[in-house]
Amino acid sequence: MIQTENELLPKARETLERILRSVPAVVGLDWDHDQNSDQKDMAQHADLTVGVTTAHRLDTLVVELKSPGHPRQLREAVNHLLRYYRHSHRNDYPVVAAPYITEDGAAICKEENVGYYDLAGNCRLVFGNYYIERTGNPNPARKNRLTATPGLYAPKSERILRALFEGKDKAWKVVSLGDKAHVSLGTVSTVRTILLEREWAKETPNGIQLTHPEKLLADWAAVWARRRERTKAYFTRAPLEDAERQMADFARQNDRPFALTGTAGAWRIAPMVRYNRTQAYWQGDPDELAQALGLKPVESGANVQIIAPRDQGAFFAKEEVGGIPVVSPLQLYLDLQREPARGAEAAKHLWETKLFPHHATEQ
């Protein structure tokens, strides 16, 4: 559950105090408790205001706290602080705080020379003669990542992301996006809001359009890597290509969704890493497909894995390669995050050749 700014204030003050007291030259901190002052002064209406006393001077830090602190919210806070700074006669140092500040959020603050810190202890504070910067502390909410972003990576929400990726250069109206993804307008609105907050998309006259699909996919892949699907393992003595074709034929004859994924699928879309295990999505009980082909269930040594997807979105934008259905490059990239045998290598190749080839060209 996302905490409000008021709920986070004690922790925000405690964190800032810990950061400032770590500087040997700081001899005192004077917190402004008069948050209800009638003075029309930003320092009196800030979330936190602290005077930092050193041996030679006194600096005042004016802090605006944002929760959860996505880039769009941080940009609003920065603009608010700068408006005060430019129209006041004070020399206060503006600072933005949030539960966690990503690299994108930090870049926004640096660009405008506004200080920042988060509750994990990461910070960049440049005031007086002092420069305090700390990076690398992990997001304390990351261990709960799967529950922290249910609005973005819920099954139906992911259908919207898939549609956006399929038309990365296209702007989408809410209604057309809902129709494409077969989800409600409310679900589209939820995903739209999150993407705009994180500045991974922009609003245009023609609708919403992705601006940083690579950042969205990297975040999505981190969540997907921790997700567990219903997967069953089998063994076959037949050549894997024969087994794959037999599974595809059976699915086609029974009008059931089926598609290769993992390194088996990547080999067909962007050949690089050879494979010795076939992975495939099948809409239904994996044992049904396995029994039809005579696959043997095994605890170890499997060379066939059949996955029952949690949502039919896994089959979105699949394509036929040599008569065998293969999931989309997007889905392949997500699934390769869980592939221990050269999965990272195959994913990188897929990223550079199919998903974002222009990025590789520019580098």
Image (cartoon, helix red, strand yellow):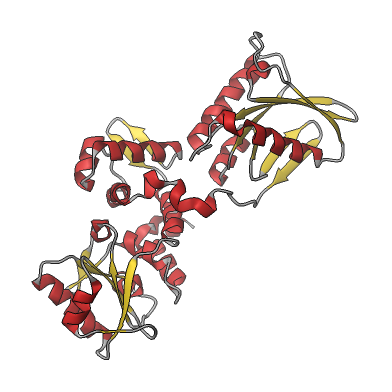
* Residue 350, above or below 294: above
- Residue 211 location, quadrant: top left
- Residue 13 spot, x, y in % from top left: 69, 33
- Residue 264 location, quadrant: bottom left
**Closest to the observer, 346 or 334:** 334
- Residue 181 spot, x, y in % from top left: 23, 47
Q: How many marks?
A: 0
- Residue 65 location, quadrant: top right
| Residue at the far right in the pictured view | 55
Taking the spot 62% from the left edge, 34% from the top edge, the residue there is 97
| Left-right relation of 170 to 142 | left
* Residue 344, above or below 111: below
* Residue 278, above or below 207: below
**Closest to the observer, 352 or 346:** 346
Asked if residue 246 can be seen in this view, the reply is yes
* Residue 181, above or below 82: below
| Left-right relation of 357 to 111 | left
Taking the spot 29% from the left edge, 47% from the top edge, the residue there is 160
- Residue 17 spot, x, y in % from top left: 75, 35
Asked if residue 173 can be seen in this view, the reply is no
| Residue at the far bottom in the pictured view | 237
| Left-right relation of 232 to 74 | left
**Closest to the observer, 207 or 254:** 254
- Residue 156 spot, x, y in % from top left: 29, 48
